[in-house]
Structures are given as C-alpha cells and as structure tokens.
Image: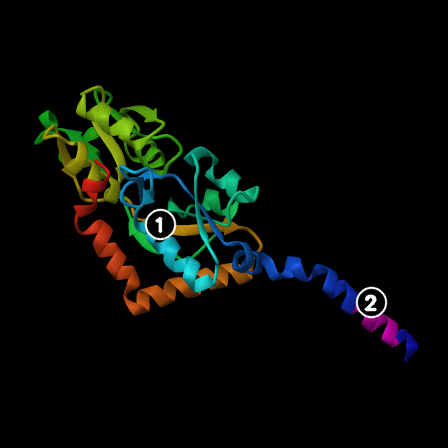
Amino acid sequence: MKTRLIALAALALFGLNLSPAWAGKLEQIKKDGLRVCLEPAYMPFEITDKRGAIIGFDPDLAVLMQKDLGAPKLELVSTAWDGIIPALITGKCDIIMSGMTITDERKQKVDFSEPYMLVGQTILLRKDLAGKVKSYKDLNKSEYKIASKLGTTGEIAAKKYIPKAKYFSYETEAEGVMETVNGKVDAFVYDSPYNLVANVQRGEGKLVFLDKPFTDEPIGWAIAQGDPEFLKAINAFLVKIKKDGEWAKLHDKWFKNTDWLKDVQ
C-alpha cells in the first residue's frame, strides 16, 4: 500500500509539473490575449487603411475569435510573408490568419484549421492582349512575361501551369500589379479575391481580369504543431460563425462590394 501511495503521489506531482504544457495555447490566450500574425498586403483579407490600422476579412474574424476564446485582448502582428511561419513557430504569435493556402509543404511545419474559404488563381492581363489571350493556357508561350508574388501559391501555379512563359517574382502583390499596368510584364497571376480588388483599385483601364480560377485552393488558419486542444477550439469557432451567419456577413462586407476601398486609397 505504501509503495502504491508513493507512486500515486509521484504521478500527481508529475502531472502538476506538466499541466501548463498540457493546457497548451488556450490557457495562455485566455490569460494574455490572442496574437495574430498576418501580412497586411493581401486585399481584402488584410490591408492597412489610411490611418495605419490593419483592416480586412481576417482581422474582423480575429475579433470574433478573440471573444469566442475568452481572450482579454487582440494583437495583430504585422509580419512579412517570407517570415510568417517562422514567426509562428518561434512564438511571436499564436495563430496565422492571413489568407494562407493549405499546402502539403506547409503542413510539414504547421497544423491547419479546416478551410474557411476556397480561392483559385486568376489572371490580370495587359489590356492590349485582350482577345489574343483568353485564358492562362494562351500565356504558355516563351513570348510572354508573367509575374506573381514570391513564395506564394500564385508563384507555384505560374511555374506549374504556364511553364513556357518567362517568369518574374515580386516582393509584394502591388508591385506585380503595377509592373503589369506599366507593361513590363504581360500578366499577373494571383488569387481571385485580390485580383478582383486590384483590378478595381489599380487597373486604371489598362488591365483585363480573366476571372475564371484555374486552381482550387483551400484557405485556412495555421497554428504551431502538436496542440490538438487549440486546433479543436478554432475549428469549433469556424463551425459556429458559419452556422450563426457571422462568417457570411463578413464575407459579404469584404468580398461582395468594394465600399471599404475608400478607407485605403
């Protein structure tokens, strides 16, 4: 009996010592707040307004998530895209909410929520190519120059589906769009929501939007690996906001009109 009691006491002490680790991110978030990594350059998922505030679909979802998880505050951590996964892994934020496509390569480094949206790659084309180029397939010739943003699924799609064209990568989406407007490249390959807005905002009558997506890409939130409790909580949150209509309300706000553009132009 004595041996059994000692063993039970040791087990209890062991459990007590490890309970913070077992609790995972949720307890920390409820105590310290929710920190969200995003790159505010991906309209309309996230963008910086005239006052320097980060606005968009993901920030609005983050506000709802903060409340749902019981976090006392929300911090939006502006992070360059090429460093956003390292920032998550090293603990600079709790979650990535930045219009990130779920890919097998990224799954090796992070855990993803269930998809909260589906997007696809589309084309912004120089206007003088209208009629001559009717789809991404027509761009697959060595005479054409195409572009996308470095390190994105747009870059992957451009190289995979339009391999014969000359490819150029840019650090930002805006740079790629403007190089197309200025005629330095023939087409910009990127996600449909961004290209839709960029065509309205920056097209200036010089671009044609080939709006039929030629890929299907699920978008999800990313968290550090090995925290099933946190993953379960954000998936439950997603189910909740889709059921109660909050997701649809925000989707209409950011994707079905461009009223918000007046705050960023």
**Callout 1 environment at 10 Å: few (<14), some (14 to 19), or many (20+)?**
many
Instruction: Give residue 52's position: percent from left, percent from top.
Output: 33, 37
Q: Are marks 2 and 1 in contact (CB under 8 Å)?
A: no
Of residues 239 and 56, the one drawn nearer to the viewer in this rendering: 56
Left or right, 151 with reference to 147: right
Going from the N terminus, do you reach mark 2 or mark 1 first? 2
Identify the disc placed on residue 83. Answer: none
Label 2: element kind = helix
For badge 2, the amino acid type reads: Ala
- Seen from the viewer's position, the closer of residues 54 and 195 is 54
Q: Position of residue 53 (x, y in %)?
A: 33, 41
Residue 238 falls left or right of residue 27 = left
Residue that carries the numbered disc 1 in the rendered image: 59
Look at the magenta stretch and give its main secondary structure: helix
Residue behind mark 2: 10
Q: Viewer-nearest of labels 2 and 1?
A: 1
Gap in angstroms between the C-alphas marked 2 and 1? 45 Å
- Where does the magenta region start and end? 4-11
Please determine whether, in this image, residue 24 is positioned above or below residue 214. Answer: below
| Name of the residue lying farthest toward the right | 2
